[in-house]
Amino acid sequence: MNNLKLMARFLSQGWRRRVDRGGPVFVTLFVTSRCNSRCGHCFYLDTMLERKGHGELSRAELEQVARSMPPFTKLLISGGEPFIREDLPQICEAFYRHNHVGQFTIPTNAWFVDRVADGSAWLADRCPDAFVQIQISIDGVGEDHDRVRKTPGNFDRLVETVRRLRIAQETRPNLDVIFNFTLTAYTIDHVEPICKFLDEELKTKQLHMNMVRGLPHELQTLEVTPAQHAAAVETISRYFGSGRTEQDWQSRTYGRLFAARKAFTMRRIHGVAGEQETPYVPCKAGLLNVVIQEQGDVQACEILDRPLGNLRDVDLDFMKIWDGSKLRQFREEILANRCTCTHETNTSTNFYFSLSSYARFARHIIAPPS
């Protein structure tokens, strides 16, 4: 499956599910609350320190959950550090078998070099019709990165992990490596050095930028002005806005459209964050997106922390929660309140399944903002 076929499947499935409400097309699965990093911007750090991994759904339980779910296209793994679980590749493979997942996105701090490199290669081999996208977190270059993450030596492990993944990619066209950066008060000055390092040293073609999510462990990380956010967006677009790729014409076409879509949505997020007037797009949380927490709670939205039920209370049958009255009530409320946020996953799904977004995107392509 190439990128264009994957996108066609995602769009076809999503537009159908908008009508029949038959299940999500984008699932965020928290697999652990454990992590060896101690990032100040982490919204989950206090929870991780409290839970210490207790009560996580087992591999067998997650396989049963997968059996209860309809097919869906995209699975985003979250945590904690996902690769702290040695059974992570097997968990993902279960969703490939039962739900025909077409894209796995797995963020990692790249500390566990062997697990990331070997586990990603194993998953790509076992899931030949799916893309395995490893999303490596980077918050600075060298000691700047280690200081933000409070893990000395992490940057060197990151570089070694990338080297190992690049070797694995040589024989696995469905394995991809991209990078993720979180803009905080601690990392504002790191944007240009990160872009330069990724472009010149690691030869990457993508850098995703996130904003601080929820309530971070260190509140001062939130102190980013709209002007600083706009400058970061422009810097990243300058380095990675072309969707650079040396692959076939389909990949080049997809890459350029994807890069343009990223720039478009980053500017929308910037507008929402800066409390500028932005066109309203109805949120698809609880209609096309869903979140499963590592202890079994199901949420329509990661930002609005409102569990709809726990999988262990319904015999690990996901559809009993999906078809329940709490989800219908949640959907009615967010539509009535015209809920809008800066959550990247929701913003992306909202874009793909809103006709008004396509019209604005076309104008963005024809006459991009200066």
Image (cartoon, helix red, strand yellow):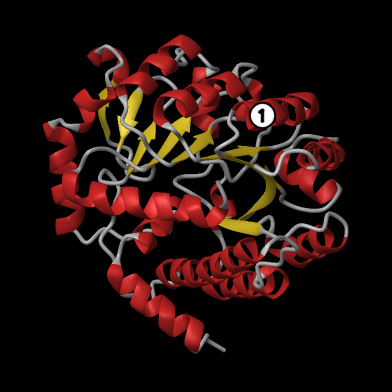
Q: Describe residue 66's horizontal placement relative to residue 248 as left or right.
A: left
- Front-most of residues 190 and 64: 64
Residue located 68% across and 33% down the image: 37
Residue located 74% across and 35% down the image: 110
Q: Describe residue 120's horizontal placement relative to residue 197 as left or right.
A: left
Q: Quadrant of residue 165?
A: top right
Q: Describe residue 242's horizontal placement relative to residue 31 as left or right.
A: right
Kind of residue at disc 1 = Asp
Q: Is residue 184 visible?
A: no
Residue located 70% across and 44% down the image: 173
Q: Position of residue 34 (x, y in %)?
A: 59, 23
202 shown above or below 100: below
Q: Quadrant of residue 116?
A: top right
Local secondary structure at mark 1: helix
Residue annotated with mark 1? 125
- Front-most of residues 25 and 80: 25
194 shown above or below 264: above
Query: Which class describes the residues within 10 Å of circle 1: few (<14), some (14-19), or many (20+)?
Result: some
Q: Position of residue 362 (x, y in %)?
A: 42, 80
Q: Quadrant of residue 297?
A: top left
Q: Describe residue 199's horizontal placement relative to residue 318 as left or right.
A: right
Residue located 47% across and 24% down the image: 97
Number of marks in picture: 1
Q: Is residue 248 visible?
A: yes
Q: Position of residue 349 (x, y in %)?
A: 38, 55
Question: Which quadrant of the rendered structure holds the C terminus?
Answer: bottom right
Q: Position of residue 233 (x, y in %)?
A: 60, 70
